Image (cartoon, rainbow, N blue to C red):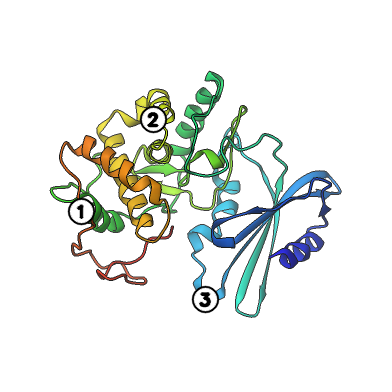
Amino acid sequence: MRSAHARARAALHARPAHDDHDAWGWHGRTLGQPVITPDGPAWIRIASAPTDQIVDTFWSGAIDAEWSMPTSIPRPRLLGWHDWTDRKWTYRAELYERVTTPPVAASAVVATSPDLPKTWWAALRAALDAIAVTPTDRVTIHPLFLAWAMPRYLGEPINTDAPTPWTTAHGDLHYANLCGPDLCMLDWEGWGTAPAGYDAAMLHSYSLLVPAAAACIHDELAHLLDTAAGRFAELAVISELLHTATKGSNLALAEPLRQRAAVLLQREVPLEPGCPHRPEAGGDEDECGASAHPE
């Protein structure tokens, strides 16, 4: 990946910055580094994937967001990109504006309660409102996945039909993708339609290890969470994150997620996933015949 980054710098007319450092993504599939271009400081992010396994939703997310998202949403602007294929791997280099405000947390699952000003929360609410009404045919999470995952991880009875129409979501909203104290929203690869309130539910779920942090999110985003749609979105996100836990991610969150689901459902939630039949949706299958949802 470092050699790929060097190739990208050459293609995008950039050189390493003096404060050069690595920012690795999930399973080493992405690598970001600060650079200097003829126009000033910038950031290059490299994404890689086996050529025959590219998921277009995630591969094209940043470019689609640059074209579709309102300019009022605080985010690093995409300045250019460069693609190439090396044997069995495909690479995409994305050149962004340099963001100097740091992420609120180093990882998605927070260990402390962030201290953020009221202006930050107001900016986040405005951004989520603007995202929600952005038209798109992209999909962050598929209804067929929820029809399979919700009864499997939350038990029965469970209604897998959202109470309101789906809206557009950032798709991966957690404190490692949010900068502060001035809001800037990072990582747009997975944005698309999802249950209304999905982003607020995602941020809340990733904060459950720190009750004070979860309580703050609940208070600041109550208009999204304290509704029938918001409760459904929480259950959807909980099912999704419990699914990732079966694959080795977010293990520490599993029990707090089940406890939160039990509160929302007002009944016990099974400790082990069941194996309900899932409507056919294509893709790779797991042990229950269910297509794997991208993590």
Q: Secondary structure at mark 3?
A: helix
Quadrant assignment, res 275: bottom left
Instruction: Indicate the quadrant containing the N terminus: top left, top right, bottom left or bottom right.
Output: bottom right
Q: Residue furthest left?
A: 157
**Distance (Cα) linking label 1 and label 3:** 32 Å
Q: Are marks 3 and 2 in contact (CB under 8 Å)?
A: no
- Residue 99 in picture, x, y percent from top left: 69, 39
User: Looking at numbered disc 3 in the image, what kind of residue is underneath it?
Assistant: Asp
Where 209 sits versus 146, above or below?
A: above
Q: How many residues crowd around disc 2 within 10 Å: few (fewer than 14), some, or many (20 or more)? A: some
Tag of residue 211: 2
Q: Which residue is mark 3?
A: 52
User: Looking at numbered disc 1 in the image, what kind of residue is underneath it?
Assistant: Pro
Which residue sits at x=61%, y=74%? 89
- Residue 16 in picture, x, y percent from top left: 82, 53
Q: How many residues crowd around disc 3 within 10 Å: few (fewer than 14), some, or many (20 or more)? A: few
Which comes before the other along the chain, label 1 or label 3? 3
Left or right for 72, reference 275: right
Left or right for 193, reference 286: right
Judge by depth and name the residue closer to the eye, 167 or 265: 265
Q: Which residue is mark 1?
A: 151
**Distance (Cα) linking label 3 and label 2:** 42 Å
